Image (cartoon, rainbow, N blue to C red):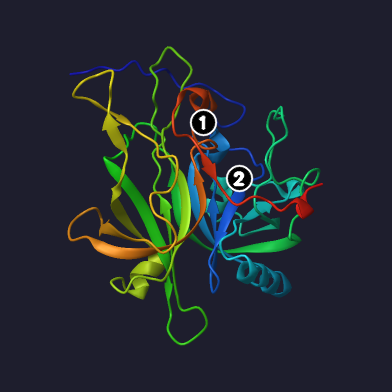
Amino acid sequence: MVHFNIPPQMSYDHPEVDNPPCQHAFILVGLERIYGVHMTQYHCEKHKYQLILHVDLPEEARAEYLRQRDLYPDDTFILCNRIEDKCSIPSLGGFARTSFTGAIYRGFRPPPDPEPEGWFPWNDRETLPVIDKIEITVKRVVLWRPFAHHEPAPDTASYFMWGHKEPGFGHTHEAHMTNLQTAELLTGPHVPPLYGLDHDHVMSLAEAPEWISGEMLNAGIVVSVPSIPRKEPDPGNPGRFRTCLLPEPPFAKGDTFAVMYRGIQPPRHVRAGPTFLWASVVNNSPALVPVTPNMSMIISPMPEKYWL
């Protein structure tokens, strides 16, 4: 029998496990239904969550967002809660917060050099939103997934696929995918912790696959993508494997690729739409960036007319 030394309960003025409110960035996808996909950071407690929200915008803001999306279908649109209305991801995931004041930005402005500590790309001092100071309503939590640092990376990538099929009106067949990330603890007990390696990938599909029912797509399913390796041979340890990163998405808009529902046969096919975020620089521990090959961030640039 293995015995563990469990420390006695301690008294705290505040809970030991908590998550302070702050600003968060969500990649927006969808037309008939609009979803916000939270940008992750494995090393920061405030952002150690995958969260997908089905959100609603005020009528005029929604019309402007759809107009912009129609003009720039492959650009990245980012929803952020404003600094005067900070919130925590658990408050949204647990439905304690069902609304917040937000702004929508188009693209990413590179940070200044040197980059200030704690710099947030979408702020009132350096960037202009395309839509500002709007009330965002959270209609549904589509995915709530706190990272577990003891979970190892799989051999091939896993994705969460969701969307909707409702025949008879508007954009009736929309589907999206995001990488089910692993924030694996890479270090031992006597050194500062490092977490990774993985990608933050948000994309839409060209159309909802015919092989999935609307009910299942609305709820969301898990698929594996055999063409995306998560492990590679470790050159320093023959016969062993290590987690790997890819410098760019393995498929472009219009590519058809195979997925496996729940990770089992048979393979089923989907067709890629635009990728709105492919990142390994922001989410993995910063100390890994200078020593890890293939780290990248692919996101549409912010036009200079939105720079301050």
**Disc 2 target residue:** 88
Q: Is residue 88 left or right of residue 196?
A: right
Image location of residue 85, percent across then percent down: 73, 50
Is 10 placed above or below 207 here?
above
Query: Is label 2 in a helix, a strand or a loop?
Result: loop
**Residue 286 visible (yes or no):** yes
Residue ID at (69%, 45%): 109
Residue ID at (46%, 87%): 168
Query: Is label 1 in a helix, a strand or a loop?
Result: loop
Q: How many marks?
A: 2
Q: Amino acid at mark 1?
A: His
Is 67 placed above or below 198 here?
below
Residue lying at the far bottom in this picture: please name it. 168
Is 242 placed above or below 260 here?
above
Residue 252's image quarter? bottom left
Residue 149's image quarter? top left
Return the residue nearer the eye: 3 or 21: 21
Foreground: disc 1 or disc 2 = 1
Image location of residue 288, percent across then percent down: 48, 25
Q: Is residue 39 left or right of residue 211?
A: right
Q: Amino acid at mark 2?
A: Ser
Residue ID at (71%, 69%): 61
Q: Is residue 212 left or right of residue 144?
A: left
Return the residue nearer the eye: 71 or 142: 71
Return the residue nearer the eye: 130 or 54: 130
**Residue 18 visible (yes or no):** no
Using the image, tell me which numbered label, if any, was put on residue 307.
Answer: none
Q: Residues within 10 Å of mark 2 (few under 14, many from 20)?
A: some
| Quadrant of the drawing holding the N terminus | top left
**Disc 1 target residue:** 43
Disc 1 to disc 2, how far (Cα)? 16 Å
